[in-house]
Image (tube, grey):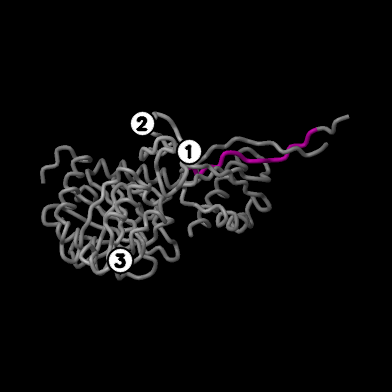
């Protein structure tokens, strides 16, 4: 007898487990009528400041809450708590991204029926979060003007996993000689047709348009929303 | 760097299949898309570590690279993507946002060894 290799077909998605959890989360979110937005970006792009501002402004008219992924500290959760919206920290340890099961665990004792918007701030990382569906309705990818215009070209994968690009810290654009033309061209090169919003959490510039955009999105999960 | 957790998921998936089918796995065949967010080299170096102490110990990971294919709305045809920095049709230059292929992260097959009679 001699050994002969034999191929057995399997055809299974490696992230099947994550996808199953994400799908069940999404069903759960839709049943509760909550619109879920996740945020991805590199460290230091202003995710937390942007989210703090979002929560503060949005909670005037909507019921909002946030989950925030952080490697080690609780700094982000403490900052976000200033908005007075419910905030929960997911400490990921050395893990560089959030997975659907972490979101599921974090939400265990929350009543989603009491929410209009739920925000999920991913760990600052433009690589790893792209592989993991968290069950969100909308994924925002943030780039700050201080990072330069070429982030989309360096990270085409994350731009292709996100729905909308947000350019942050626009109040600093002039100081760092940010080229809007190049930035837009780069975003559209890796993701043609991607909507882009520009804003500053510090000065509030562009926040209104962004909030209108979010309010409009809510109708996609709750067609008769009249809050 | 999330390749170790990806490698562990691959091993777990393959172990489950191997156990269910009662086979010994010599190699795992994986399809890896250019837009999967996973780096082949990092994955390969993590694989051995992930196999340690499992049914997969000593097995190989064979990675098939899957290039990105987009759909051109102007040509109404699928086109290979010529640059990851430029999502447009390689024939007519139209920007293309529809990705047909390239996000794969899939175990396609397990390789096992079967004893067959020696040829006479």
Image location of residue A138, percent across then percent down: 29, 47
Residue A42 in the image, given as x and y percentages of width and height: 36, 62
Q: Chain of mark 1?
A: B
Magenta stretch, residue numbers: B104-116
Kindly identify which numbered label has been placed on residue B74: 2
Per the image, is A178 magenta? no
The residue carrying mark 1 is B80
Of labels 2 and 1, earlier in sequence is: 2
User: Which numbered tag is attached to residue A85?
Assistant: none
Determine if marks 2 and 1 fall on one subunit: yes
Q: Secondary structure at mark 3?
A: helix
Residue A158 sits above or below residue B17 on the image: below
Picture residue at 19% right of the left edge, 55% below the top: A64
Q: Residues within 10 Å of mark 3 (few under 14, many from 20)?
A: some
Dot 2: chain letter: B
Residue B24 rendering spot, x and y as whole percentages? 68, 43
Whether discs 2 and 3 lie on one chain: the answer is no
């Amino acid at each position: 007898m001699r050994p002969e290799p034999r191929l057995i077909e399997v055809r299974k998605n490696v992230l099947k487990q994550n996808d199953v959890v994400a799908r069940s989360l999404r069903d759960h979110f839709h049943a509760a009528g909550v619109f879920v937005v996740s945020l991805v970006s590199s460290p230091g792009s202003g995710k937390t400041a942007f989210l703090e501002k979002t929560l503060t402004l949005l909670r005037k008219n909507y019921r909002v809450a946030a989950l925030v992924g952080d490697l080690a500290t609780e700094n982000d959760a403490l900052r976000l708590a200033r908005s007075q919206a419910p905030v929960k920290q997911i400490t990921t340890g050395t893990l560089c991204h959030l997975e659907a099961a972490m979101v599921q665990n974090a939400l265990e004792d929350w009543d989603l029926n009491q929410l209009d918007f739920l925000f999920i701030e991913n760990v600052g990382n433009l690589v790893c979060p792209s592989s993991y569906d968290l069950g969100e309705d909308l994924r925002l990818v943030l780039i700050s003007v201080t990072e330069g215009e070429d982030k989309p070209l360096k990270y085409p994968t994350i731009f292709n996993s996100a729905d909308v690009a947000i350019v942050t810290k626009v109040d600093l654009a002039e100081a760092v000689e940010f080229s809007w033309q190049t930035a837009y061209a780069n975003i559209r090169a890796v993701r043609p047709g991607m909507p882009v919003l520009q804003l500053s959490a510090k000065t509030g510039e562009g926040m209104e348009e962004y909030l209108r955009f979010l309010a409009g999105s809510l109708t996609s999960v709750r067609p008769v929303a009249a809050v | 760097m999330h390749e170790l957790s990806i490698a562990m998921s691959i091993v777990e998936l393959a172990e489950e299949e191997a156990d269910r089918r009662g086979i010994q796995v010599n190699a795992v065949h994986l399809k890896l898309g250019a837009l999967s967010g996973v780096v082949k080299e990092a994955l390969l170096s993590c694989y051995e570590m992930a196999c340690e102490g499992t049914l997969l110990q000593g097995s190989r990971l064979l990675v098939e690279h899957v290039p990105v294919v987009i759909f051109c709305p102007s040509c109404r045809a699928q086109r290979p993507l010529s640059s990851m920095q430029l999502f447009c049709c390689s024939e007519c230059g139209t920007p293309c946002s529809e990705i047909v292929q390239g996000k794969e992260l899939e175990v396609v097959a397990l390789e096992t060894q079967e004893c067959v009679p020696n040829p006479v």
